[in-house]
Amino acid sequence: MTDLEIAQAATLNPITKIAAKIGLDEDSIDQYGKYKAKINSVNMGKKLPDNHKLVLVTSINPTPAGEGKSTVLVGLGDALTKLNHKTIIAMREPSMGPVMGMKGGATGGGYSQVVPMEDINLHFTGDIHALTSANNTLAALIDNYILHDNQLDLDPRRIIWKRVLDINDRALRQTITGMGGISQGIVRETGFEITAASELMAVLCLATDLADLKIRISKIVVGYTTDKQPVTVGQLHFEDAITILLKEALKPNLVQTLAHTPTIIHGGPFANIAHGCNSVIATKTALQLADYTVTEAGFGADLGAEKFLDIKRPILGKTPDAIVVVATVRALKYNGGQSLDQLKNEDLAALQTGFANLQRHLDNMNRYGIPLVVSINHFVSDTSAELELLKNYCETQGITAVITDSWAQGGNGTTDLARAVVTATDQPANFKPLYDNQASIAEKIEQIVTNIYGGKEVTFSKKAIRQMKQFTAFGWDNLPICIAKTQYSFSDDPHLLGAPKDFTLHIREFIPKMGAGFIVALAGNILTMPGLPKKPAALNMHIDADGKVTGLF
Amino acid sequence: MTDLEIAQAATLNPITKIAAKIGLDEDSIDQYGKYKAKINSVNMGKKLPDNHKLVLVTSINPTPAGEGKSTVLVGLGDALTKLNHKTIIAMREPSMGPVMGMKGGATGGGYSQVVPMEDINLHFTGDIHALTSANNTLAALIDNYILHDNQLDLDPRRIIWKRVLDINDRALRQTITGMGGISQGIVRETGFEITAASELMAVLCLATDLADLKIRISKIVVGYTTDKQPVTVGQLHFEDAITILLKEALKPNLVQTLAHTPTIIHGGPFANIAHGCNSVIATKTALQLADYTVTEAGFGADLGAEKFLDIKRPILGKTPDAIVVVATVRALKYNGGQSLDQLKNEDLAALQTGFANLQRHLDNMNRYGIPLVVSINHFVSDTSAELELLKNYCETQGITAVITDSWAQGGNGTTDLARAVVTATDQPANFKPLYDNQASIAEKIEQIVTNIYGGKEVTFSKKAIRQMKQFTAFGWDNLPICIAKTQYSFSDDPHLLGAPKDFTLHIREFIPKMGAGFIVALAGNILTMPGLPKKPAALNMHIDADGKVTGLF
């Protein structure tokens, strides 16, 4: 059975019943159909309960097909629930761009899925559409301001605010707008990003409440004057209209797993081109309502987990009590040099070589001082010898490692992991941040590159050097750094697998995200607008006259 | 009190209670919050009950501020309900572009409003966002097809499928996409329209069920080969993916008036640049569930009503039993030559001159053979002498005319209109269509221009003449015509007010809408992507820390 078939065959509980499980009555939620809801009235300002545990699920560097991190996350949530721990899963919202492009959803898989999966993977409750329209309304207001007013002398060539769509559309990466003569506005070069990469997505994910959302929006830098001074949304007085467009999107969404574990899905920045974590509001809401909150950060621990710990954690005000690193035999062999089309075949040597990738991620997470557990996520093609070798490796290193089979067995395949996680969260943690925000931009990037990526040094383009000077002059240097780079390697080269050393990471450009409160550093060829493949997943999809969908995943 | 303040002060009934009024139980709807729902299970295919009445509300040529057609519609629905007629109001969904641009919503006004008005005017249940993303997913798939495959030899210069946003953004009217080198695709000139003007919006509004939706989508012509042969969505095999993206949007939305009259709001094409009617599915649903369905068509009767009767009616399979023509003293004086800033002052001469505009609309509607009522929609600035003069004029012409005050008095200000409408619907109707679809494209346009607009003749650009030949060769000539022109005049010149004669209407271009099943004829300078004014309405909006919005309308 496909993921979609399993999801369609499931019996869901009414969302009111799921809400009641975590103490939310009908007035505390807004239903979106029978199986989705927005959570209305959580006391966001309240101090988080001290004894409620937070577990972060991350992974090694993945193969292009992914290592089932979300599947393990869902299985772990279900298993904790079965062990009678009041648990909420907190995840990111899937982007529709990849759904139409590459086969594969973002709601777990097999018997560890969040449902209703079709809805969640398509329009869901409209949060991403609200972000798209808010983003593009702001863009239209900016172009209109330049045409009609422009008292601030905003330079059309220096506008950095791009339009967005939740679509993989390479043709929109670089565009010219305003063509057609005087009444069409001002001709300028610009482009579109995918909504998941937008600053508004990061703002929504990092805002602590509606007032904070408006403040963050007003701080967004949209461009520069001809005198090269930054211009913010607040200076243009657009922050209220944009906040109004996001007021419902700010509310976290409640759904359920196939086993009816309450799951909050809210905010969906990618971890390669953005900060990769679900919203602070969602995680806080979960922490207030559940004894165990299990959450994930996108792609490998070099991207998502690093950004969770250095960008999201300070705003969340809560450090994970344990970290689960998902490793697969497949991805370790891939990192050890086995080619993609051979991954189904046993290769103990490649596996052994690939351990270096796992080890660096473990060292990195250890560096933060948080207890660790490795989840060896079982795939059908794994051989016993391979699984044994991997488990032994972890034990030799003194790391708890548990084989999980959440895809085929749901929570039953993750019970041992859940027990290990409970034990880990009871261990003392001693969190040590990676860098001090007061350090310079270059120093912070060097910390990430040398301590997390394992690289030798960082180089900066002339533009990036000029930007660091400017940003420092503007007082923007005391912010965390969000590196945009490939998810396939510790380096900025997607082909440099395993645990590369002595490489140089090149920063070609910075983008100030003053609303989000971080500086994006672009490394390598990473694009903020994906493209579609030759055979897009859209071609496999079918719908019959009764609305039954097949071929979605 | 502003419209927003009145709406915010209202006490709404739970949408489940509104649904129950019209025989829909909780399983027949999907709640979207407490006061909105999508209607799931109506027997779309069923024959419409013979004795259920349909009333179409239209108007004279409006002033830029509008004549309160929606306000009269809502008041009429409330008044019919008070007279114990089981009534449903069927309206269009507002577009967010104008909301952010010009002050003024599209959910009625004063005490004749549909609520929750903030939600309806902003993202509502996401239908328009679904259309935007479906439209742009199709655009991305087309560009991707050309880049990777293009076995059909689709000519990049001849792609007519544009991208859309639900935003007033003049800078996107004409764009160049695909810049940045080989890996970005193919550089080409294209542009964006507002979603309300998109073919998918028309397709959603004219589809009779999900199967018909998919068939219509597959018929959409996206461009031409280098041999100038049309290429459809069906030939590219994208119809299933696009239909999947619209499957929820196809379900009509249920809300309520301030007086709790059930109101179905679904589909929102503009009437100047599109066909201007809410969805066939919504109107059918209302007709099945209520004794009286009251609905509207956008702008003046030359645009919305003509398109309702010639485009929507044949698919709906039901002719209105009565037509209400909304007239205001203001708009008649405007049509009679009084300047906009003087409309608050009495001017009986201008009013008298303006009667010609009303008279032509009445003659036009009479031509269709449907019983008529004039609603004289009262504005505070109207003098007794003006109202008297207008009422006498109608009586002299043998037309029932009722003064309505739905803005200030809600349904109580529309009771007499409701009684007159009930009487009118009991009169025998003898519908005569304006044109035969079997006539040529030019002949159909001549019918509209000479019989409805009152013009002398139609001229065609060289391009339009070439297109008529092509379309006829493709077998596309036997479709109804959707003229895109200004709403301010019977002609294609917005400054030619009143009842102009002897003018020539110039058709500059045709756009085939084979999915919608009509041919758009562009007249005058009408734009399919509006712009923002110098002081956009967005600047007046405010939101406080508790989410309370002010300044929206």
Image: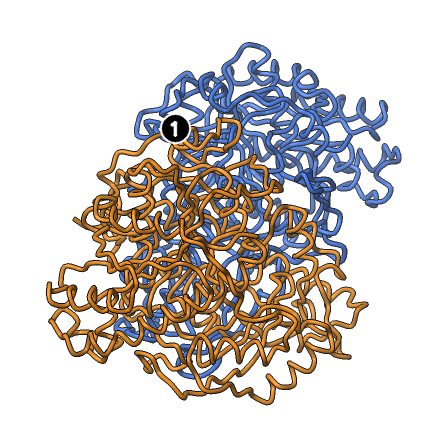
Chain colours: A blue, B orange
Left or right: B469 as drawn, with respect to A305: right
Left or right: A503 as drawn, with respect to A195: right
Residue pictured at 70% horizontal, 34% vertical: A4
Across the whole image, how many numbered discs are drawn on residues? 1
Q: Chain letter for mark 1, please.
A: B
Q: Is residue B195 visible?
A: no
Q: Residues within 10 Å of mark 1 (few under 14, many from 20)?
A: some
Res B15 → quadrant: top left
Left or right: A229 as drawn, with respect to B409: right
Q: Percent x, y for residue B226?
A: 75, 78
Left or right: B416 as drawn, with respect to A258: left
In front here: A230 or A170? A170
Q: Percent x, y for residue A214?
A: 31, 47
Secondary structure beneath label 1: helix
The residue under label 1 is B17
Res B311 → quadrant: bottom right
Q: Amino acid at mark 1?
A: Lys
Q: Percent x, y for residue A256?
A: 55, 25
Residue pictured at 59% horizontal, 25% vertical: A257
